Image (cartoon, rainbow, N blue to C red):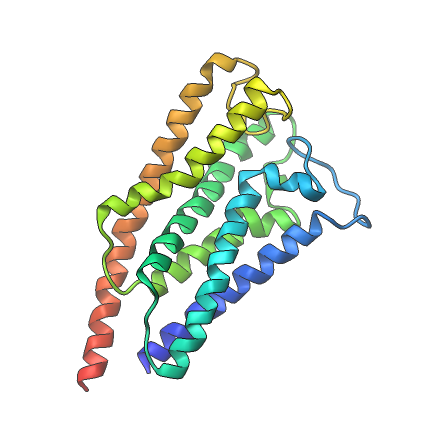
Amino acid sequence: MKKRAFNLISALFNLLTVIFVAESVIYNFRSDIIRVELVGGGFGWGCFKYFTVLSNVFCAVVAAVCLYFNARNVVKDEFVFPRFLKTVKATSTVAVSLTMLTVVFFLGPYAVFIGKSYFALFERNNLFLHLLCPMLAIIAQMVEVSEKRPFVEVLFALIPTFLYEIVYTVMVVFVRGWKDFYGFTFGGHFGLTPVAIVVMLGVTFGIAAVEKLVFDKFAARHSDLIQNEEKE
């Protein structure tokens, strides 16, 4: 019964993640909506230059794969996910957690600084991408974990941030094809970009380490519950 409950709860959060992210991406392609950009340039295909969108799409794709295993687990009355999928799920959860925390503690105050509303970053589809989907991913991860992960896997969570920082730096500092919508250059001080890169990698590592510790506690509890059920 507990395995089935875990699967159904996990499936619900994964399904909501897929739906919300899909709706948010589609929103950026709709031509019947008048929108005001907050920090610079990106509707239609342009939305994919944002780490916010990329991290949420990454998370939704992983959630969709998890849905397949949710269904299979319910049929087989088990609670099993492939090891690789668990690692990728943890990595995608860190990515959207970084998005959420960056908005809450950096971009929100930055919006106020430039004369906008803090809550403008949580309007319409931004509510899904900046808050709800990251929260759904975190809760789903709490439900799905059933074993502790090696600490070295924390380093995998740095990959999406590192890759994006490379692209962002090239496009903002060298190509000058994007506005500095994440403020990496601190107002045009391109020499400070390495500082922003190191800081964001450090923050990502911190998020990954904290989430691992939290999820490990849930994993131990879930493992005990499932083992006790199997003994009954």
Q: In percent of the image, x 21 and y 63: which residue is there?
A: 220
Say which quarter of the image contains residue 175. Answer: top right
Residue at position x 44%, y 24% in the image: 196
Q: Is residue 133 left or right of residue 201?
A: right
Toward the viewer: 49 or 219?
49
Relative side of 146 to 70, left or right? left
Pick out the residue farthest to the bottom: 232
Residue 48 percent location from the top left of the image: 61, 41
Residue 52 in the image, given as x and y percentages of width and height: 54, 42
Figure quadrant of residue 158 = top left
Q: Is residue 63 left or right of residue 91?
A: right
Residue at x-position 39% and y-position 73%: 7
Dividing the picture into quarters, in which one does residue 1 lie?
Answer: bottom left
Classify residue 100 as left or right of residue 22.
Answer: left
Q: Nearer the viewer, residue 146 or 165?
A: 165
Q: x%, y% of residue 213?
A: 25, 50
Q: Identify which residue, 116 or 173, lies in the foreground.
A: 173
Task: Give the x, y percent position of residue 72.
Answer: 42, 77
* Image vertical order of residue 167 relative to residue 76, above or below: above
The residue lying at 53 percent from left, 60 percent from top is 17
